[in-house]
Amino acid sequence: MRILLAPSAYYPSLGGVEELTSKLAQTYDQSGHQVTVVTNRWPFNQVRSEYIDAIPVCRIPFRLPERNLVSLVRFVTLGWLSLVDIVMLVLSFRPDVVHVICCSSNLAYMSLLSRVLSIPLIVTSQGEIGMDAAGLYESDDYIPRHFSKLLMTAAWVTACSANTRTEVLNYSKTTRCSVIHNGIDISEYALSHANPRLATGRPYVFAMGRHVYQKGFDVLIRAWSQLQLQDYDLVIGGDGTDTKFLRDLIRDCELESSVHLIGRLDRRGVVSHLQHTECFVLPSRHEPFGIVVLEAMAARAPVIATEVGGVPEFVTHGVNGFLVQGDNVNALVLALQELVVNGVSQTQLDAGYATAVAHDWSTIAGEYLEIYSKCAAGEVQG
């Protein structure tokens, strides 16, 4: 099968959308399918085309006719060039299906492409409506105004969690929407990596993700300031628009000696930090799915997560992790005190690992492939 993956962003950008696209592309390529990735060329200085992990990647500016003069002029004068580039790519690759992953300007272009060239369109929502850090879906831009109509052109729609599916159904008129959870590469955790211990030499609690309001890292820092865990550090990976705010909060709480923002991590860094943490914490106010929780389970790390979004769909309190109320400092304090001081049973760690194994990419990719096959065979029509 020829599969055209169209994520909202791709490497060198880092995030869940990029990881999902990469793992699907590699899994299908290794299974003998032909895969090409097309994504938005933003910023424009990114390479137009290249191979990443042997997968061809093409970047095209997905300009839209927004309601401001500069964007409108760019769309009128340059938008047709993007359309020509996309059509040329499709005519040369001849995909059986087009798969949009996370809806942004990519959805508008791929929807038009699907209709004009009669190629089945599959759309995957990654929680972009509820996890709207940039406020796109609260604006009057092109995508919010046309989102429902664009989704109606899809042969099938998937969501990364039941919670995200509800958001999609509330925001659009589509009735063809199923849940496919995100996955992990369980083999990444087969090898043990060296302990990335800080200069303090103390054991640490670990958290990571984009530094935005929805991720709730400020709640975690405030909880840490109330704990009596002088022999431990709190390590937070990632970066984002709230990084300066978090640094200021750490300073205001006088936690510079025990709370460390370590920036973005590569895959080896993620795995090694998870393998050696005393526990992993996901303090999100909203979380479409929470893939990093699965990664922590794969590393056999104890898990504390907020019961928001899609997280309770695979974390059961007291069975394979601990769940606490979102945006609640006191609840997080109690959970951290209990877990760090008393630890968890081997039974709970084993249950978490079993949950992670059930979400290996080979399983997730197979679920998508079944949908591709049905759409390509005309069993599902947009």
Image (cartoon, grey):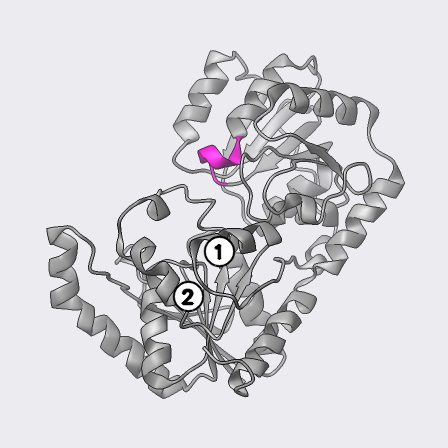
Residue 190 visible in the snapshot:
no
The local crowd at label 2, few if under 14, some if 14 to 19, many if 20 or more residues have their Cα within 10 Å, is: many
Percent coordinates x, y for residue 218 in the rendering? 51, 25
User: Residue at image x 65%, y 44%?
Assistant: 311
- Name the kind of residue labelled 1 in the image: Val
Residue 150 image label? none
The reply, left or right, for residue 182 in relation to residue 140 is: right
Quadrant into which the C terminus falls: bottom left
**Residue 286 position in % (x across, y down):** 53, 39
- Residue 149 in picture, x, y percent from top left: 36, 65
On the picture, is 40 further left or further right than 300? left
Find numbered disc 1 in the image and state the secondary structure of the residue it sits on. Answer: helix
Q: Is residue 41 magenta?
A: no
Q: Are marks 1 and 2 in contact (CB under 8 Å)?
A: yes
Q: Which residues are magenta?
A: 210-216
Front residue of this view, candidates 278 and 91 = 91
Give residue 208's quadrant in the image: top right
Q: Nearer the viewer, residue 242 or 172?
A: 172
Instruction: Write the residue at 77% across / 37% down.
Output: 317
Q: Is residue 311 above or below residue 325?
A: below
Q: Which residue is mark 2?
A: 151
Q: Nearer the viewer, residue 346 or 148?
A: 148
Please say if 89 is above or below 271. Answer: below
The residue depicted at 48 percent of the width and 73 percent of the height is 55
Give the residue number, with chain letter if any, for mark 1.
168
- Which tag, 1 or 2, sits closer to the chain's start? 2
